[in-house]
Image (cartoon, rainbow, N blue to C red):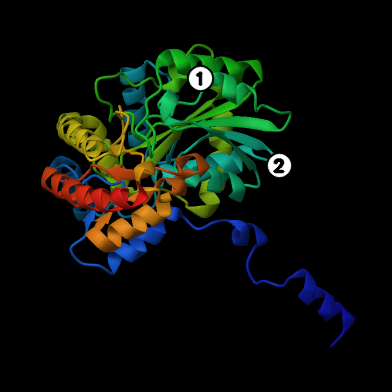
């Protein structure tokens, strides 16, 4: 064998990318895989509405299929959808986005997040992110060649990231701040005042702000602040959102990005090579959601609120202290009374009591000592899950005391 071939074997020991090899698998999927092999499990794990997509939205998609609308759309999305979305953002937030140049329809917010990172980051660029936060945030930064800079939050500050903590981590490599409020996994909601302080930091250091607002409509007793509405920040904000949570459309895979024409053009360039266009039928459904989906969405939020109150009180009553989430559909209780790690607690709870939750450590180091409980499931299931969790906590708390 030649020297040249030997050297090549040393340079390329693996058939897969070193970047991908270093990337940790999603901490959520492990538990879903285990869950799939068990019967009789009550799942508080998956972050998905338990409602069916409202009928008018489904009917619009069915009608589009009957009429044969099964072809590609433009890369950026159907003009009718972008126009309707532009009207929606104007009506709800008084934000003006040119539908032709400043809006991009994507395959869920997940694609929008991935496109954003690949469009704005050069190798080594840093993105400041709250910890804990959605599992894809740091992963998408890594895959784009960037460096996530995690800022710990805690129950003492209601898992809200502080402007001062962001500013203390700004370096000459910092490119952007990534926020997701209302938050997954904590249910935290940031006030307009606190977001304004973060916007001031972004302006001072000329940083981009990526704002994932997929849970914008799922708030309880508070008002959601769309970050792009803050003074002098819209041009440097990349607003990400979609239809999955508010309209029970997770499987439709339809989301969007709203930003400056320059950033949307860069994102569209990547989108046209990798995806081409979001699914046509899902785009038609999204048009109908924007036109007629508000009453159904409001009913779902009202039901989530009832469940939220039950699960938070129930968790606190069994000894798992939990701050009151003001948004999304997650409770994030502390499990420290058991003396277990988040992963150990989640695994044992699933095996012993057949209740599925997600370890807080899946969402970052600051999530250790907590678990995520999704209350997008029936009240009956929530109450039964709480009864099982009480048995589990009583059993293991007595051992740790």
Q: Residue at x 36, y 18 (%)?
A: 93
Q: Quadrant of the N terminus?
A: bottom right
Mark 2 touching mark 1, by CB under 8 A? no
- Residues packed near mark 1 inside 10 Å, few (<14), some (14 to 19) or many (20 plus): many
Q: CA distance from mark 2 to mark 1?
A: 25 Å
Give the answer, above or below, for where 223 lies relative to 375: above
Give the answer, above or below, for where 129 lies relative to 88: below
| Position of residue 265 measured from the top left corner of the image (x, y, whole percent) | 56, 36
* Residue 44 visible in rendering: no
| Position of residue 195 measured from the top left corner of the image (x, y, whole percent) | 47, 18
Left or right, 2 with respect to 257, comes to: right
State the residue in front, 334 or 205.
334
State the residue in front, 203 or 79.
203
Q: Residue at x 50, y 43 (%)?
A: 364
Left or right, 337 with respect to 137, comes to: left
Which residue ends up furthest to the left in the rendered image? 380
| Position of residue 97 measured from the top left corner of the image (x, y, whole percent) | 44, 23
Which residue ends up furthest to the front in the rendered image? 401
Give the mark, 2 or 1, whose residue is nearer the N terminus.
2
| Position of residue 67 measured from the top left corner of the image (x, y, whole percent) | 21, 52
- Judged from the image, the secondary structure of the residue bearing numbered disc 1 is helix
- Judged from the image, the secondary structure of the residue bearing numbered disc 2 is loop
Which residue ends up furthest to the bottom in the rendered image? 1
Which numbered tag is attached to residue 209?
none
Q: Please tell me whether mark 2 or mark 1 is closer to you in this view.
A: 2
Q: Residue at x 16, y 48 (%)?
A: 387
- Residue carrying label 2: 124
* Residue 57 visible in rendering: yes
Which numbered tag is attached to residue 234?
1
């Amino acid at each position: 064998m030649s020297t040249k071939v030997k050297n090549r074997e040393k340079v390329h020991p693996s058939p897969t990318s070193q970047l991908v090899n270093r990337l940790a698998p999603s901490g959520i999927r492990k538990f879903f895989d285990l869950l799939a092999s068990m019967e009789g499990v009550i799942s508080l794990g998956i972050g998905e509405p338990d409602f069916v997509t409202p009928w008018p939205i489904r009917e619009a998609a069915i009608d589009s299929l009957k009429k044969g609308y099964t072809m590609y759309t433009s890369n950026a999305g159907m003009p009718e959808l972008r126009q309707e979305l532009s009207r929606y953002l104007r009506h709800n937030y008084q934000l003006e986005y040119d539908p032709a140049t400043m809006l991009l329809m994507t395959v869920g917010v997940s694609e929008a997040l991935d496109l954003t990172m690949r469009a704005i980051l050069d190798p080594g660029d840093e993105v400041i992110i709250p910890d804990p936060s959605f599992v894809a945030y740091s992963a998408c930064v890594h895959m784009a060649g960037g460096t996530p800079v995690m800022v710990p939050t805690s129950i003492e500050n209601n898992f809200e990231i502080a402007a001062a903590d962001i500013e203390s981590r700004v370096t000459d490599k910092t490119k952007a701040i990534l926020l997701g409020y209302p938050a997954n996994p904590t249910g935290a909601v940031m006030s307009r005042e606190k977001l304004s302080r973060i916007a001031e930091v972004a302006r001072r250091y000329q940083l981009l702000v990526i704002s994932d607002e997929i849970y914008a409509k799922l708030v309880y007793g508070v008002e959601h602040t769309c970050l792009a509405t803050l003074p002098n920040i819209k041009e440097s904000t990349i607003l990400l959102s979609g239809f999955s949570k508010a309209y029970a459309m997770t499987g439709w895979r339809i989301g969007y990005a709203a930003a400056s024409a320059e950033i949307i053009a860069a994102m569209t360039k990547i989108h046209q090579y990798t995806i081409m266009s979001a699914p046509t039928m899902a785009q038609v459904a999204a048009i109908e959601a924007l036109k007629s989906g508000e009453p159904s969405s409001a009913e779902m939020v009202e039901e989530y609120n009832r469940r939220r109150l039950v699960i938070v009180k129930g968790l606190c009553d069994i000894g798992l202290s939990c701050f009151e989430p003001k948004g999304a559909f997650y409770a994030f209780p502390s499990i420290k009374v058991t003396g277990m790690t988040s992963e150990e607690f989640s695994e044992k709870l699933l095996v012993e009591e057949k209740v599925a939750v997600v370890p807080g450590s899946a969402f970052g180091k600051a999530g250790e000592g907590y678990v995520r409980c999704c209350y997008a499931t029936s009240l009956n299931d929530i109450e039964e899950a709480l009864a099982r969790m009480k048995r589990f906590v009583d059993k293991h708390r007595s051992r740790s005391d």
